[in-house]
Image (cartoon, helix red, strand yellow):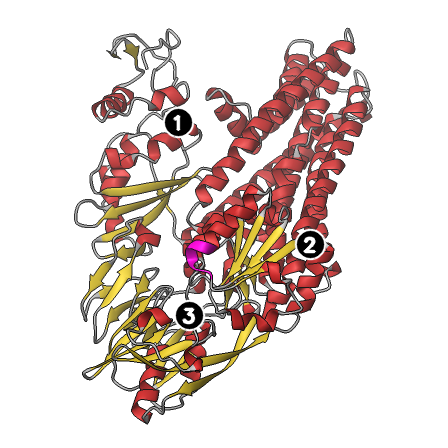
Amino acid sequence: MSVPRHDRTCYHCGADCPNDTIRADEHLFCCQGCLGVYELLRSHDACTYYDVEDHPGQRPAGEPEMRFDGLDAAAGLRAADTAPGRSTFTVQLPDMHCASCVWLLERLSRFDAGIISSRVDLLSRGLTVDYRTGQTTPSKIAMLLTSLGYPPVVVTDTDRQDGQRRSRRRLITQLGVAGFAAGNVMMIGLSKYVAGPGGLSADVDLTLRVIEIALSLPVLFFCAQPWLRSAFGSLRKGVVNLDVPVSLGIVTIFLRSMVDILVFHSEGFLDSFTGLVFFLLIGRLFQQRAFEALEFDRSMRSFFPLSATVLRRGRHEEVAIEHLCVGDTIVVRNSEVIPADSVLLRTGAVVDYAYLTGESEPLECAPGAMLFAGGRILGRSAELNVVKPSTSSYMASLWSRQDIHTQRRSLSWTSERFGLVFTASVLAIAIVAALAWLPDVGTSISVFSSVLIIACPCALTLAMPITYGTAMTMLSRRGIFLKNVAALGELQRVTHVVFDKTGTLTSPEQAEYVGEELAPSLRMAFSSMARHSTHPMSQAIARQSPWTDVPIANVEEIPGKGLTCRLGERKLALGSVGLADVPMSDVTMDVNRSGAMAIIDGRAVGRFVMRHVLRSGAREMIQRLGQRSISTSVVSGDGPDSGAALEGVFSAGDLHMSATPERKVEYVLHVQRRGGHVLMVGDGLNDIAAMSAANVSVAVSNGSSRIVPACDVMIDADRISELDHVLQYATDQHRVVGMAFWFTMIYNALGFTLACSGALSPVITAIMMPISSLLVIAISVGGARWSYRRVSWE
């Protein structure tokens, strides 16, 4: 922190200081605003901010209070009230640019006690803030951000679409100005060519040159802004990004033209300069249109097939989340996610908001309490009355939000490092080529500019995100959803697949009761209790009774054991032998048999036995995995007898039955210690810990709103037979990226050779550069779609 900086630059933002009167702790500042930010950081012991990067700060704007007066009531600002007394909102920070910014912005809680946490998405320059509604407000947080030098822009979905339209209109305007200037400058050049040497009087020639310069200045200062602003901003912060070479080429041609016209009174290259910017803008517009057409990062969430259980006329119906209406009564079972903001009816409920807030302590709620979308019900089921409809895209965003900022920061770091190496190499080649053409100054400058402009690092910056994003979209259309592009990379490396059995490889067809005769009221009570669980066994038991639910109370689900409830004065239980105080000695109560015990007042009276049927295509899928040298095994909590459905599919050594959740984790770690890259496939009920331990995990979904935070992939239960195809498709995407990479290598090698030889003018290279980018996009999208069609989907 005490290391001296440049003598006349601001310690905070790096700008030149007009004088040396503003000082603190032997550091120089350009204004009182930067000094104020430094003192704020120092008072909160946050000066480590300056250790991450030199001059990381932004000069703070003055008097922000009036700008944010209406922020607290802005429509669409509050993205979600995540829990009682807590909320979250997202803003855009255009001035965020480096690792120091990330370090500071993710520690906002040091400056405002009402802020719980803050998460940065560096690539989109977004900041999501979780805060306590009683201690701070969005307007206060916005003023804090402004005082730190990061004035926020509040962005709703509508604002984002408006912003895209404004950006497109600005780009089209720049293209129009550049096209107008290029056309007129070329017409002037043509008139001079037709007139020939000495064909124009001195006054006319001077007038035409003034017009050429006047037409070119807006091209430099307005039309070339996308490249010049980016390059200047990166260099000002000590970072070399991928726009630097192009900007150098643009500026070099313009300055050379000015010297020729004003000093040597020759023609210059303003026609090449304006044409260069014009064609660069055409390429930028096509790239932007291509990205908007893909929209894989956000639009894929609209495919998410989530539903909620709605209680209508005493019966349960599955309804898509988008079709929930205000006033609907929904039933949310143990481990399911609340799909919409609702009011709790009847009995109390225990809600886990850890997925939203990070706090692990569940919240006990009384009837009438407000429950927020994204919370997870624990224990007994809850009946809720919807007060604010939700959407599948919001629910899907809860699943993918956990570590997306870490992933994106890593991709940004990789791109930045690549940009530094690539740009340095391009500059070196351009300088050497230009020197080789001396003393022919004109050709030397043309070669220098051509080399800088033709450089195309598309393989890393475009190929991977577009290929993987397109692949994710294609898979989503088959009911297969990936959390992020990192999951696709992990799927390529899988060497061992571990399956849970119930609900994944097998489907429950029917639950048959064996044991003492039960009164109809007790049969209905067990069925009613089973409806409170999402376990496949419970759902099979619930389906056997067509009658209306009976009034049971105190329903509780004990993970790994089963369900308990009360029917009047009697205590009922449904699940494992551990719930019974007095197990029966009858053969139907054999602990090695699969099924759920029916227990009344601690005594086992019978057992619900479920007949499992291997899912269609599962056997062939296992065989195809073996042909690809991917080993498979089953680790299930079901009894040994339930493995009969898997005999002939797995060897005896690969079947591990009666496994506890802890045993599943141990098995996954055992395979990893032997060098395996493990894919865990389960339903997310008793195997969440194993999913977290695996390298990559797949949750088999039956369309309920129970999102599994630990999983990387969600697959519709009917698509499990396509798992091997998913792994093959993921591997194919690595080859597609490789194709784009080799194309870029060949393009750059050929382009550099022609540019260094003087065979290409800057205008031609300006045409070639966007064409190469569009070809990379075409290879990435086309390759992902072609490889999708090659797969023999079921």
Q: Disc 1 or disc 2, which is closer to the eye?
A: 2
Mark 2 burial class by Cα count in 10 Å: few <14, some 14-19, many 20+: some
Query: Residue drawn 64% across and 18% down?
Result: 252
Instruction: Please tell me whether residue 207 is drawn above or below residue 334 in the rendered image.
Output: above
Instruction: Please tell me whether residue 594 is drawn above or below residue 497 in the rendered image.
Output: below
| Residue beneath disc 3 | 321
Q: Disc 2 or disc 3, which is closer to the eye?
A: 2
> In this rendering, would 540 be left or right of 132?
right
Which residue is nearer to you in this view: 735 or 477?
A: 735
Q: Position of residue 771 (x, y in %)?
A: 72, 40
Would residue 210 be visible to someone looking at this image? no
Query: Does 788 appear in magenta?
Result: no
Q: What's the distance in space between the residues labelled 1 and 2, CA to CA?
A: 40 Å
- The kind of residue on which mark 3 rests is Ile
- Give the residues drawn in magenta, as a range: 659-663
The mark nearer the N terminus, 2 or 3, is 3
> In this rendering, would 511 be left or right of 615?
left
Instruction: Please tell me whether residue 726 is drawn above or below residue 307 in the rendered image.
Output: above
Q: Which mark identifies residue 728?
A: 2
Task: Name the quarter where the N terminus is drawn.
Answer: top left
> In this rendering, would 789 be left or right of 562?
right
For residue 5, which quarter of the picture?
top left
Disc 3 and disc 1 in contact, CB within 8 angstroms: no
The mark nearer the N terminus, 1 or 2, is 1
Q: Which mark identifies residue 100?
A: 1
